[in-house]
Amino acid sequence: MVRPLLAQLQQITGLQTTYLTRMDWDAMEQQIRYSHNDGAGPRIDEGLSVPWEETLCRRTLMDGRTNLSDAGVTYPDNKAVAALDIHGFAAAPVFTEEGGLWGTICGASKARAELGETDMATLRLFARLIGEKLSQLETRQPAENVAVAEPRTASV
């Protein structure tokens, strides 16, 4: 479900790279779970882990600035902005059903980006859909494990 949403988000917003992160609260790291890179934009690879304190996602969410037209001007000291030449950036939190922060859905571009309210509403919608699906999977997972384990246990 995530990969088509990331591709659609890229088409709608024009951001060159879109990606979904997950928080590892024990390690205080943000992990890139899925990414969709167009080849011209900043390369953000799946599996990458970054200290949460240093992430552009965290900084924008904490500052209430989830849509940046020029990240280099807004956050010139951010390592990712400098290293990946990020100018356009947008982020939305992905919450669990209980309200905990699971991760973020983001988009980045080497070009300046002027995202409108429709673009941001789409980003927030995709974040909510992913959060709802994650909650469904987490709720269903124990029941599925029991259904698989019961026959195996009976044979032992």
Image (tube, helix red, strand yellow):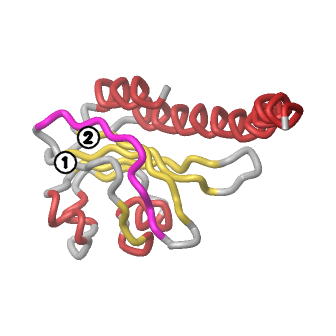
Tell me the tag on residue 17: 2
Secondary structure at numbered mark 1 = loop
Prevailing secondary structure of the magenta residues: strand
Q: Position of residue 70 (x, y in %)?
A: 22, 55
Q: The magenta stretch spans which residues?
A: 29-39
Q: Position of residue 118 (x, y in %)?
A: 44, 29
x 43%, y 35%: residue: 117
Q: Is residue 74 magenta?
A: no
Q: Against 132, is 22 above or below?
A: below
Decide: few, some or many residues near mark 2? Use Cα within 10 Å; few <14, some 14-19, many ≥20: many
Camera-side mark, 2 or 1? 1
Q: Is residue 37 magenta?
A: yes
Disc 1 residue type (three-letter): Arg
Q: Is residue 127 found left or right of 152 in the rendered image?
A: left
x 57%, y 68%: residue: 25
- Quadrant containing the C terminus is top right
User: Residue 140: which quarter of the image?
Assistant: top right
For the residues labelled 2 and 1, say whether their Cβ atoms are less than 8 Å apart: yes
Closest to the observer, 12 or 43 = 43
Q: Most extreme residue toward the right, as rendered?
A: 154
Q: What residue would you read off at disc 1?
A: 43
Disc 2 residue type (three-letter): Thr
